[in-house]
Image (cartoon, helix red, strand yellow):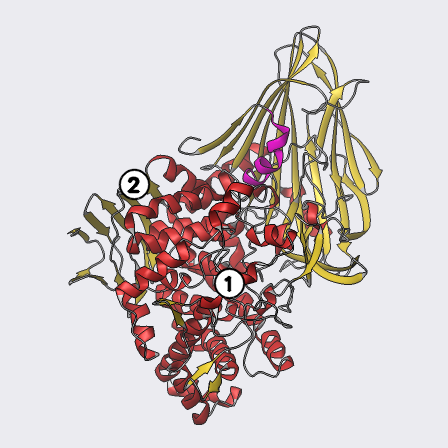
Amino acid sequence: MTGWTWEYEGYEPADARLREALCTLGNGYFATRGALPECAADEVHYPGTYVAGCYNRLTSEVSGRRVENEDMVNVPNWLPLRFRLAGGTWLTPDTAAVLDHREVLRLSAGLMERLTRFGLGEGRVLTVRQQRLVHMADPHLAALRTEFTAEGFSGRLDVEAALDASVSNAGVPRYRELDGHHLTHVHTGTSDRDTVWLRCRTRTSDIRIGMAARLGAGVPATIAHEEPRAVQRLGLDLVPGRAVTVDKIVALHTSRDPAISDPLFAAVERVTRAPGFDELLESHLTAWDQLWRRADLEVDGQAGRILRLHLFHVLQTLSPHTADLDVGVPARGLHGEAYRGHIFWDELFVLPYLNLHFPEVSRALLRYRHRRLEQACTAARAVGRRGAMYPWQSGSDGREETQQLHLNPHSGRWLPDHSRLQHHVGSAIAYNVWQYCEASGDAEFRHTKGAEMLLQIARFWADSAVYDDRLGRHRIRGVVGPDEYHDAYPGAARPGLDDNAYTNVTAAWVLARTLELLESLPEPRRRELVERTGLDGGELEQWEDVSRSLHVPFHEGVISQFEGYGELAELDWDGYRKRYDDIRRLDRILEAEGDTVNRYRASKQADVLMLGYLFGPAELQGLFRRLGLRLEEETWRRTVDHYLQRTSHGSTLSGLVHGWVLARARRAEAWEFCLEALRGDVADVQGGTTGEGIHLGAMAGTLDLVQRGLTGLETRDGALWLDPVPLPELSSYGFALRYQEHWGVRLRLERGLLEIAVPSSDGSPIDVRLPGRAVCLQPGDTGRLVLGE
């Protein structure tokens, strides 16, 4: 690990899946895992290519039940390029002696480089060097350059390149009982003497896929169509010490793309007019330079190097190309098949970072939600509610994609999955709408699509709240909070919990913000919205009432995760750690023992403490005041302590949220959790999950931890608010951001000194607010502020 490279020395089959995920290359339109081109999918390797928003739905027989799942499709593999001495066996690191092996991910360039020296016996060595890119300037192109060099021998080398549609979705072992064959109607053909093509379609969503490959090596290739593969073969004459180069350039289109007539025609035309590898590389590097300037982040040491890797993968999944697509935030990026490529609430951890660098991408991701608003309203009506009930897992069309069953690998049992009751996803969407509009100043979106989503989400919460005469408060029953361990009361006949604190407080926030937004709308627009939605004054009065009277339970002087939480048993944490060592997935351990985590005060991840992640101390106290409750600093500290001692951190988001909260509540312990968040994927702390796809929310969240968490940065009321938290382990850092019409505003914190530089422009001045003072910076100004302890 260096400042701008991520390197692996030696060949380790046990680490192959992890390396392939972390060496994925993408451009926001599609991405390809970092598998070696000569290796097919097997128990060690898993090449996979995924197009953003390309889903397909299949039905499988599982435990005697028909189960329907929609998956992000593993599209045809464009990588295959294998080689052998004439008449010999195909060479891979698993079948031949490996003298040296190195893989280097060049973050600044968006390049993967590979060098392998194969020992062929009798002093003969074949050196293979490769460069791979998924083009960041032209999102439909990818390229692979391979150099072969003989040492100690001369002779013929057979090379076979292919486009391969024999792939399936088989990258997650626990899904293998499910049907993963998504492609059908495969055809191959030739468009030129050096170019082959492949076309297919998905089985039910009927997305047509076109792919074309151009091979260049200075010698003619023979072409064979061995469906479902289009194959090009070369014979290369090797001379000791002289490199022979093969370039493979590939184009990929689907029928979801705009401005094309047919994906196959578009792919063939694009690969035909594409320049050579060197020219492609030059424009690719320029595109990456521009991205890095906009997302500049300077953090010293190992933390800075990991943050740069995280930023790299965020940019590959959600680049400016994403702004042209109808896609959401896939929780595992475009890096693997875990969670089936679905969209959860992870955008809650991603958009706050993008808002301040690539607001056009944030807007596109929010438009994905707006396009599915009608579906969310339909889902609410189906359960007898008004407004919009967004799904916990979303895919192509916005219907609920949460699985009905999930496999516990500890017990081998398929269990009911009740996580679809996490209706707080609606509050996450509303929060992102608000944060985007505050950061970007996008009044048009706030007044139109944003207002429409907020209104329907608020309507759902108000209609979900039931007044309890005994408590004199409104209650929301039958939900699941962010802590997925608890989905029912012990022994209950039906799933769901009452008055999850996080759900109720965020619902109150949504209602209050929506009322504020409606009040601020231009009168003609407000009238349009009222007419279209049937909103009336009585409904607004109900929202006001509910936003001030939702029940928040307490026990033992701390906020209860849900009503009745305080009556649960305490878990023998030390005993379970001694018996199992890793208890992150405590739910699986207990279920395998015939027990249930529902009986215990034990959390998978931050739940109540998520409130401290979303809201600064002043705003959170204000929310409780609106609810007629007092949230003293001491009460919050006790709450933090209580849940910190009872959380197993079974999610990569857990360390992130705890580090964020502890930076203000218990600073001395914050860094331990920040490190946990940083190491989540690079060290695969969840035990094998990273190989199935990186955790995009956690990666983006670590970037935002520096950008907003440690700086206390908020965008509200037309100003930048800052309240930095000095952590000894991260006392110096800097980054550039885009705030409303200002591009490249630079913040630098250096041991108690905060520097803010506003680039020259014809924009308005920026109001900067810190505790106890305010400054106004004109374009071209640099402010230097000394911070107190």
Q: Please indicate, yes or no, whether residue 268 appears anywhere in the rendered image.
A: no
Judged from the image, the secondary structure of the residue bearing numbered disc 2 is loop
Would you name the residue on which mark 1 appears?
Answer: 364
Residue 567 falls left or right of residue 140: left
Question: Residue 154 appears at what percent x and percent y?
Answer: 71, 10
The stretch in magenta equals 11-23
Judged from the image, the secondary structure of the residue bearing numbered disc 1 is helix
Residue type, label 2? Glu
Tell me whether the residue at label 2 lies in contact with that at label 1, contact meaning CB atoms closer than 8 angstroms: no
Please say whether residue 702 is one of the residues in the magenta stretch: no
Can you say whether 296 is above or below 382 in the image? above
Residue 2 falls left or right of residue 86: left
Task: Determine the image quadrant of residue 342.
Answer: bottom right
Q: Which mark is residue 66?
A: none
Front-lying residue, 418 or 111: 418
How many tags in the picture?
A: 2
Front-lying residue, 340 or 452: 340
Would you name the residue on which mark 2 appears?
Answer: 729
Can you say whether 779 is above or below 167 in the image? below
Q: CA distance from mark 2 to mark 1?
A: 36 Å
Residue type, label 1? Ala
Residue at the spot 75% in from the left edge and 27% down from the top edge? 220
Question: Residue 2 appears at what percent x and percent y?
Answer: 42, 30
Q: Earlier in the sequence, mark 2 or mark 1?
A: 1
